[in-house]
Amino acid sequence: MSNYHIKHLEEYFQVYRKSVRYPEVFWEEVAEEHFLWRKKWDKVLEWDFSKPEIKWFQGAKLNITENCLDKHLYIRGDKTAILFEPNDPKEEAQHITYKQLHEKVCRFANVLKSKGIQKGDRVVIYLPMIPELAVSVLACARIGAIHSVVFAGFSSTALSTRINDCQAKMVITSDGSYRGGKTIDLKGIVDEGLEECTTVENVLVAKRINSDIEMKSGRDHWLQPLLDEASSECDAEIMDAEDPLFILYTSGSTGRPKGMLHTTGGYMVYTAYTFKNVFQYKENDIYWCTADIGWITGHSYIVYGPLANGATTVMFEGVPSYPDYGRFWEIVQKHKITQFYTAPTAIRALAKENLDFVNKYDLSSLRILGTVGEPINEEAWHWYNDNIGDKKCPIVDTWWQTETGGVLISPIPFSTPTKPTYATLPMPGIQPALMDENGNEIKGNSVEGRLCIKFPWPSIARTIWGDHERYKNTYFSAFENKYFTGDGALRDEVGYYRITGRVDDVIIVSGHNLGTAPIEDSINEHPAVAESAIVGFPHDIKGNALYGYVILKETGEVRDRDNLRTEINQLITDHIGPIAKLNKIQFVPGLPKTRSGKIMRRILRKIASKDTSNLGDTSTLLNPEVVELIMKDAL
Ligand code: PRX
């Protein structure tokens, strides 16, 4: 039996049982056999969910980049580590070997040092999907700086909020980015964001679109000349297993985004382990995850997990619709992709297009397909299975979160029989529990409840940067001694899990987590708006779309409603980004509220979903009459 590489179902059950019975022995064996440690740990695990405090491989010393780069230099130095596919198919793809990547990372790390970045400093990275993004992430890790990648579709306000929250000393960006047929002025967004920030001393600027941008003297530096000057050797900073590796922000149901802090040793072990098993990775595979490195999927399964296994990982700069809807499949054919990992929203969008876009290409290199980010509906699952996988490729529906660092529930392909819409079984080491509303665990099969995890795994986030209390309240207070995921789930008759969706005020739109409160706060800044409430409603492609109920101030003047809608969406774009724009905006005379003043979103959700046959009990409302009025004008 191999702990590290599960090859059939019986083996999965054996490994799983061992991982639950002797978790420390199990993870110690995995860690010992497959990674480079400068010093081994004194203790495998120490944990207390009531504080919460979680420490894996305490006392161990390592650098994650030695595991992702140096380790491979002699065995596969000339193998492609990163295969970069540009936005424009006419531009040549770049094959960056492990040797070249190692050198690039060392040079970049030396540039960071030369600009005063030291172990523990925070560096915000705001870059498109170009090789510099992966290189800068690894360069931070090389010297022990804490990277915080901000998705380059976020607005300047969202960027400055994150920079200020983690008190970043440096920002790494580019002169712009390509997105399909458009270019985006990233540097302009950074300049605007930095007007609100005082901690950033230097901005490094990569050249991508060759646009003529303003460089602020003393603060902004072109990256390339600095790299050219820098030495190509840089010793790795020796880190403690529990030293921070990165901060990645995710939306909460209320308040500011949460800076989830991931640490070094456990994160490395878990992402590498799950990459190997979930994608049944083999040496000559060409693996492609279409996510952006600005999300956790990109951190764990474009950069760290694949590189720790010595894999070839594809980085795609573009979008699925450019130059046409066949782009994904063209790339699969061109690079002979073996594992393809994407989001249900992309599958739904592509499934709407003509099948010729798929059939034109030879997809026979594919062995495994994956999805992540939101529940996949049955129709999309079958389209993916039939047309992309030719019914031969198992689909791994991987359930996990920014907070979990790696995949927690997923089939192991060729071992776990798949079932449409089910994430199926927990990974080794993961102990799920379904809870009822009174805090009791629901045992047995064919049941539904709130999804918790009972025991720590190596890549669980350790805290929210600067706000441990919030970490405790959000994840460890709803159910005693358990990590609460915020998701609902059901367990079928054989013990397979199906994630049913969020049970809090987070809405997943096109696979992106959006909290209702920050969107409402942006809307309420409009001078004509008195109050607002956002809910999600089902959408063919996005999974969920946003429906806003807005109460206007009584100013006497009747404004053009369509103009107002545009202005409201512009405010949201400015504060958060275009991904949070509302699909529908209804102006309402009031919002249904409980006697304690809480908005009854349940009712608003039903109206938005056109499911008003049973609104439930409205008698406890402070203002039941408003429900009728809202329903009358519903969009
Ligand atoms: O609701 C779940 C949904 O996405 C949430 C986590 O979002 P985020 O932190 O942005 O990470 C996404 C990428 C790992 C979860 O709480 N989710 C993620 N994967 C699935 C899913 N819902 C259903 N099925 C999935 N496979």
Image (cartoon, rainbow, N blue to C red):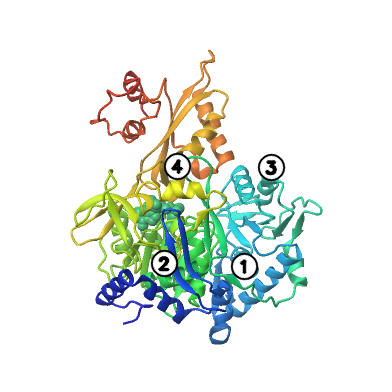
Picture quadrant where residue 111 is located:
bottom right
Could you give the CA–CA distance between mark 4 and mark 3, rounded to whole angstroms?
24 Å
Circle nearer the N terminus (1, 2): 1
Circle nearer the N terminus (1, 4): 1
Could you give the CA–CA distance between mark 2 and mark 3, rounded to whole angstroms?
40 Å
Picture quadrant where residue 611 is located:
top left
Could you give the CA–CA distance between mark 1 and mark 2, rounded to whole angstroms?
22 Å
Circle nearer the N terminus (2, 4): 4
Crowding near the residue tagged with mark 3, few <14, some 14–19, many ≥20 C-alpha atoms within 10 Å = some
Nearest the viewer among 370 and 485 is 485
Q: Given contact means CB atoms under 8 Å apart, are the residues at marks 1 and 4 in contact?
A: no
Residue at 42% over, 23% down = 588
Which residue is the extreme one toward the right? 217
Evaluate whether residue 510 shows in this view: no
> For mark 2, what is the residue?
340
Q: Secondary structure at mark 4?
A: loop
Q: With respect to residue 254, does 452 lie above or below?
A: below
Residue type at mark 3: give it: Glu
Q: Secondary structure at mark 2?
A: strand
> For mark 4, what is the residue?
253
Nearest the viewer among 336 and 423 is 423
Q: Given contact means CB atoms under 8 Å apart, are the residues at marks 1 and 2 in contact?
A: no
What mark, if any, has residue 196 been given in the picture? 3
Residue type at mark 4: give it: Ser
Q: Given contact means CB atoms under 8 Å apart, are the residues at marks 2 and 4 in contact?
A: no
Nearest the viewer among 303 and 583 is 303
Q: Given contact means CB atoms under 8 Å apart, are the residues at marks 1 and 3 in contact?
A: no
Which residue is the extreme one toward the top? 556
> For mark 1, what is the residue?
135
From the top left corner, tell me how far across and down residue 38 is, in percent.
57, 79
Q: Secondary structure at mark 3?
A: loop
Crowding near the residue tagged with mark 1, few <14, some 14–19, many ≥20 C-alpha atoms within 10 Å = many
